[in-house]
């Protein structure tokens, strides 16, 4: 299992090579999108957001947004340290938190949920290749993290575990 410093070093080291892989197909904008996705995924949206980690501290005062996530998920759980599921879960959680804030702040001038949906759809239709490349970068950094940790099997989430279920050994 790698330390936070080792995860950060690997993310910074492989960010540029990962970005350059995309240059032939999507040009400089694709390389930037892939590289930024990789760096954001490894440094801000790390699978270790379920603990007090470097990624959590990088959020500064906004790290409080991740407190419910950390309380709900056990470290290295199925929902945080599984390829695709972990990244999707972190993105869905962050999206839900942001939509919740927009909903609460709408009377104060924040955009409505309908306006956000329209903007999101427009951006998706206009920039789909770059957004998909950024998502691949987010997921690639998560895979790097999981490979460094050597996580063959994530732990079952707290919400899905049976209470009092401990492996009992039968003595003969």
Image: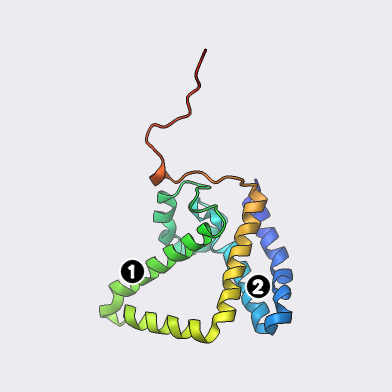
Residue 111 seen in render: no
Task: Please say if 127 is above or below 49.
Answer: below
Q: Left or right: where does residue 21 sit relative to residue 146?
A: right
Location of residue 134 by image quarter: bottom right
Question: Where is mark 1, residue-wise?
Answer: 100
Question: Where is mark 2, residue-wise?
Answer: 35
Q: Which residue is depicted at the point 41% across and 61% down?
A: 65
**Colour setup of the view:** rainbow
Q: Secondary structure at mark 2?
A: helix
Mark 1 is surrounded, within 10 Å at the Cα level, by few (under 14), some (14 to 19) or many (20 or more) other residues, namely: few
x, y (%) of residue 74? 47, 46
Residue 35 seen in render: yes
Q: Left or right: where does residue 139 sit relative to residue 107?
A: right
Task: Indicate which disc, 2 or 1, sits on the residue closer to the N terminus.
Answer: 2
Q: Nearer the viewer, residue 78 or 172?
A: 172
x, y (%) of residue 169? 50, 22
Q: Secondary structure at mark 1?
A: helix
x, y (%) of residue 117? 38, 80
Q: Left or right: where does residue 86 sit relative to residue 69?
A: right
x, y (%) of residue 152? 61, 45
Q: Which residue is depicted at the point 38% across and 80% down?
A: 116
Q: CA distance from mark 2 to mark 1?
A: 29 Å
């Amino acid at each position: 299992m790698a330390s936070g410093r080792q995860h950060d070093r690997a993310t910074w080291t492989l960010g540029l090579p990962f970005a350059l892989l995309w240059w032939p197909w999507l040009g400089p904008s694709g390389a930037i999108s892939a590289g930024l996705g990789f760096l954001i995924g490894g440094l801000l949206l790390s699978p270790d957001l379920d603990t007090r980690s470097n990624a959590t501290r990088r959020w500064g005062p906004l790290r409080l947004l991740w407190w419910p996530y950390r309380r709900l998920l056990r470290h290295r759980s199925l929902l945080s340290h599984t390829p695709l599921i972990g990244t999707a879960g972190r993105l869905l959680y962050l999206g839900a938190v942001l939509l919740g804030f927009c909903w609460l702040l709408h009377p104060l001038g924040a955009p409505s949920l309908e306006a956000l949906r329209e903007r999101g759809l427009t951006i998706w239709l206009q920039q789909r290749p770059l957004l998909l490349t950024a998502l691949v970068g987010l997921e690639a950094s998560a895979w790097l993290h999981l490979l460094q940790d050597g996580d063959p099997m994530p732990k079952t989430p707290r919400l899905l575990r049976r209470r009092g279920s401990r492996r009992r050994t039968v003595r003969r």
